[in-house]
Image (tube, grey):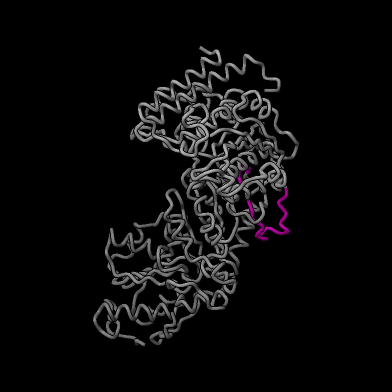
Amino acid sequence: MTDPIVTGGASVQAPVDAEPRSARLAYRDRLVALLPDHPRLICLDTDTGLFSGVEFGPAVHRYVNLGIAEHNLMVMAAGLAASGFTPFVNTMATFAATRTAEAIKIDIAYNALPVRIVATHGGLSAGRLGPTHHALEDIALMRVLPNMTVTVPADAAATEAAIEQAVGLPGPLYLRLGRKPTPALPPTAQPPRIGVAQVLRTGGDVLLVCCGPHPVLASLAAADALAGDGTSAGVLNMHTVKPLDVAQLCAHAAGASLVVTVEEHWRSGGLGGAVAESLAEHMPTRLLRIGVDDAFVTLVGDHDALTAHHGITAEAIVTRIHRALCRGSGNRTPRTASSGPRGKEA
Amino acid sequence: MTGTADKARIVALSRHADRIREHIVNMCAGAEGGHLGGSLSVVEILTALYFAVLDVDPRHPSAPDRDILLLSKGHAAIGLYATLAERGFLDPAELASFGTPASRLMAHPVRSVPGVELPTGSLGHGLALGAGFALAARLDERPRRSFVVLGDGELQEGTVWEAAMGAAALRLDNLVAVIDRNGMQITGDTEQVCPLEPLAERWRAFGWAVRECPGHDLGALVDTLGSTPWQPGRPSMLIAHTTKGAGVPFAAGLVQSHFVRLSRRQHMRAMAALSRARRKAGDD
């Protein structure tokens, strides 16, 4: 994906200037704070280092480092959960979802056990660590499993909210986090709740459906840029990919000439796949899926560089939407219900 | 046979084992057949556990302090169902429904069957599940023990050894594993397919307390399994030397006994052999 950046003259800025925070550390701190007062919570680690130096106080016996053994992690967690504990298990997304997929399927999902799979280094956030550590398949693998909830918080505050909600959530949860700090989303009246899509912008022409820090921030900035073009774009933070909030998806897609999914995942099977399935069944709508192309990401670069290379930026999203609208209208220039012919096409 | 289990008790256990074998043979005569060989080899192991070792109550299958039994070699489900029926968790009449559409008795254990803790059958999972139960019991300061019955071919799964390391590292001495060492897997002898020996040394090297015993000797099984932990701070591994297809002469010791649908004639021959063996033991 190397689309040239075309903004139609609009300024494309990050939506907020908040100090970036690490969702990974936010998770760690919130879990450590919850442990003493929740005696059925247990934290199982695989030598990730995330908890190095952490003081667990009276909950020290409920932090267990199992070594570098992810299968053992998932299956032991199932045994603990079957004994009444709620384990939070820790590893990187590709090891969590892909290496141990069968253990999650049989021991956790089949038994609907309340294991919280906290998967860091989701998407391309492992950056230069390369394809061995990228996780661009995990959402697809996890969301196909019965009983599983799959959620991708978009910032540290949403992660903290998800951890609080995860304590009492029935069944297993796959929580995908990134690696390094990311900016906070703008404050919203509607705090994120697992299973409920978060409406970040309303708009009628285009609906952006996104999950995860980079895709959501890029979608917000793209919506602002499109507004500058006179194209009204809604933004739905579909942080919970399973169960998908189909009601809100359809409600906000109604009347839109284009639905665009944006995710840090291979374009197959993830959020785009989930949205495609639901729209096709309930409300056939033109769909543009933005994500990582069907290839391993061998470019050497940090998280920002890799997502940018794969078109997960406001500029690239705007360009793709302009092109799609042009194709949809049969013109070389975008024509939407509210804007008429405007903008440029590369 | 050595040990303290008295003779009358062993005779009583043998009767249970005989009936469990008959149930297994009957289930393998059904429309779909069953995993005959590995179910027959594990009969005395399950009999010793369910009738002399495990703290379980069929009237309260979910009692909080019950011991846990996981049949990691889940393909021997009919052996487990037969044992649970003989122990009172199931009506033995239900066994006739094995494998039929309306039945809950699948070819691998399912949780809907009273006494089945978790589904098994994908090899290489049971030991880590047992370790999870054992760690939970320790955290909860419960006397509960976890018993895991493994197949020997199953030990070729790397995940078994991941769990073996983990359980030893955590010093889970409330975890007990038994290997049904019948020496065979689907395509031949384990030592020809992918050697496991020196098996006891391997487990010792992984930090387990290891013992071996004849796997059809109820007295030896009861004595050995009833005295865990053998070393404080170490999980226990019993290598029980068994015969695949034990008790049915035309199946015993044969790789082909792994999965069998018994013909009517084979069924009659098998039941006759079991009956003869029982008479010989002075039971009838």
Which residue lies at the image location 54% right of the left edge and 32% below the top edge? B41
Which residue lies at the image location 51% right of the left edge and 59% below the top edge? A98
A52 falls in the magenta region: yes
- Residue A34 point in image, percent of width and height: 63, 50
Farthest residue, direction left: A330
Residue B11 drawn above or below residue A215: above
Q: Quadrant of residue A247?
A: bottom left
Residue A9 drawn above or below residue A180: below
Which residue lies at the image location 72% right of the left edge and 47% below the top edge? B205
A186 falls in the magenta region: no
Q: Which residues are magenta?
A: A39-57
Question: Residue B90 versus residue A252: which sits nearer the camera?
Answer: B90
Relative placement, left or right, of A307 versus B159 is: left
Residue B227 drawn above or below residue A104: above
Residue A88 in view: no
Residue A332 drawn above or below residue A14: below
Q: Quadrant of residue B183?
A: top right
Question: Residue B95 versus residue A112: which sits nearer the camera?
Answer: B95
Relative placement, left or right, of B272 versus B281 is: left
Quarter of the image where the C terminus of chain A is located = bottom left
- Residue B204 point in image, percent of width and height: 72, 43
- Residue A294 point in image, percent of width and height: 42, 71
Question: Residue A282 versus residue A217: which sits nearer the camera?
Answer: A282
Quarter of the image where the N terminus of chain A is located = bottom left
- Residue A317 point in image, percent of width and height: 41, 77
Residue A131 in view: yes
